[in-house]
């Protein structure tokens, strides 16, 4: 018989740990990469337009940066004819979306995850570049999905897209649009982000202290204490408040499985204030889905009577790779964060992690879907096939971490 106290304890610990173990570190990384995108906005557009031969490499590098911003920026470039279809595929294969922040955040707190985090990023990058070049060499386009292997192939249907040199690079970012300044969600996010950052900064300080204490004492653990006048109690309340504020910001976005939108990216690239707001919004999104993953795993074990070792049995083998690849077909980052969190909980294998990382497109598929539906549908095929191949190959060669 499950008691109400057990349920409450699971909820409180999940909220606290999601904030202190993941959110505060994700916030720091999101802010860093968002700032880098802000100060470099537009500077690479002309370069990539004039270097068609290197476009899949640049696209994969844009995709591999944590978050979805880099990948989203590439979509209007394809719509304008600035980059090849192979570049789009390379970008989508390489991107891990917001799930990358979860992996990196866990690696910061647990050094045993450093190697697999580096490995999954390198594999995604290499596969993205390779498959992107394959698409271009085979002259594959959305209208000609078999490329030169097609019976009706004509050489004028090429993967090389003509470049209009009369267009300015700034127009690519103007294509991303701007957010509409109306509605309670917009008001809540744009007025409440300051409070969220204050609580997050305080949480980051305590999270770093917890890492130091854990390094000094292997048996150290944060006690569940509700008394705010004690150190452990105060830290617990910081976690609860931080996660609660994150959930509020998440709800205000009205984007349930995807965080980054073209409008939010467009705003961020023109304003440092919007960069701070978007960073808070993106981190809140990650927090919600990480907390959801924690609750799903914990309640599954509580009500089913199984433990993590039992669940891990189903996360190994070819079936896990197939399921992880299929989850990657879902647009948006929410379901992908749950899949990635499952790996951090030792519930799925490294091959399944890699399969999901390659297959998923993050939020970048949404702008492509809006601009070119056929291109987006074929893009999901081109990300899923290598995901299955690489995932099964890793199992066959017994490569795991």
Image: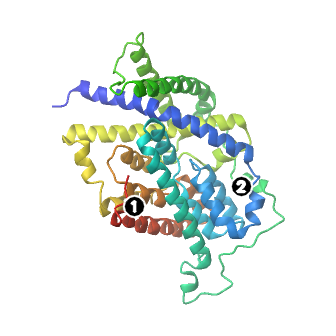
- Secondary-structure class at tag 1: helix
- Crowding around mark 1 (Cα neighbors within 10 Å: few <14, some 14 to 19, many 20+) is some
Instruction: Tell me the tag on residue 336.
Output: none
Image position, residue 269 (x, y; %): 71, 44
Image position, residue 16 (x, y; %): 41, 28
Image position, residue 333 (x, y; %): 49, 49
Q: Residue furthest bottom?
A: 151
Q: CA distance from mark 2 to mark 1?
A: 31 Å
Q: Which residue is mark 1?
A: 326
Image position, residue 358 (x, y; %): 48, 60
Q: Which residue is mark 2?
A: 175
Q: Is residue 382 above or below residue 293?
A: below
One can see residue 78 in this view: yes
Residue shown at 27%/29% (left/top)?
Answer: 7
Which sits in the foreground, 72 or 32? 32
Tag 2 near tag 1, CB within 8 Å: no
Q: Is residue 228 above or below residue 300?
A: above
Which sits in the foreground, 333 or 28? 28
Q: Residue furthest front?
A: 216
Find residue 296 and report its image quarter: top left
Find residue 112 and report its image quarter: top left
Nearer the camera: disc 2 or disc 1: 1
């Amino acid at each position: 018989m499950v008691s109400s106290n057990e349920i409450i304890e699971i909820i409180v610990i999940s909220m606290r740990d999601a904030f202190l173990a993941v959110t505060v570190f994700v916030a720091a990384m999101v802010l860093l990469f968002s700032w880098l995108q802000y100060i470099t906005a537009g500077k690479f557009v002309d370069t990539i337009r004039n270097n068609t031969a290197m476009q899949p490499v640049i696209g994969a590098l844009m995709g591999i940066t944590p978050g979805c911003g880099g990948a989203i920026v590439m979509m209007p470039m394809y719509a304008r004819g600035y980059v090849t279809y192979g570049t789009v595929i390379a970008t989508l294969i390489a991107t891990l979306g917001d799930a990358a922040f979860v992996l990196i955040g866990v690696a910061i707190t647990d050094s045993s995850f450093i190697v697999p985090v580096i490995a999954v990023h390198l594999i995604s990058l290499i596969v993205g570049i390779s498959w992107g070049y394959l698409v271009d060499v085979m002259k594959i386009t959305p209208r000609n999905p078999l490329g030169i292997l097609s019976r009706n192939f004509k050489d004028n249907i090429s993967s090389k897209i003509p470049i209009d040199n009369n267009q300015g690079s700034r127009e690519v970012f103007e294509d991303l649009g701007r957010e509409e300044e109306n509605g309670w969600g917009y008001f809540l996010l744009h007025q409440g982000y300051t409070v969220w950052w204050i609580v997050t900064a305080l949480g980051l300080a305590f999270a770093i202290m917890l890492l130091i204490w854990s390094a000094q004492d292997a048996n150290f653990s944060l006690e569940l204490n509700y008394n705010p006048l004690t150190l452990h109690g105060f830290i617990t309340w910081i976690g609860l408040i931080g996660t609660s504020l994150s959930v509020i910001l998440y709800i205000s976005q009205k984007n349930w499985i995807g965080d980054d939108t073209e409008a939010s990216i467009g705003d961020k690239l023109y304003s440092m204030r919007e960069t701070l707001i978007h960073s808070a919004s993106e981190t809140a999104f990650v927090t919600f889905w990480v907390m959801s993953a924690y609750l799903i795993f914990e309640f599954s074990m509580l009500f089913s009577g199984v433990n993590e070792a039992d669940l891990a049995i189903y996360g190994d083998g070819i079936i896990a790779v197939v399921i992880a690849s299929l989850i990657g077909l879902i647009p948006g980052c929410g379901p992908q964060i749950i899949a990635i969190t499952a790996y951090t909980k030792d519930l799925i294998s490294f091959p399944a992690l890699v399969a999901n990382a390659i297959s998923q497109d993050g939020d970048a598929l949404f702008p492509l879907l809006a601009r070119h539906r056929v291109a987006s549908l074929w893009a999901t095929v081109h990300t899923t096939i290598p995901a299955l191949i690489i995932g099964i190959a890793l199992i066959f060669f017994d490569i795991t971490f």
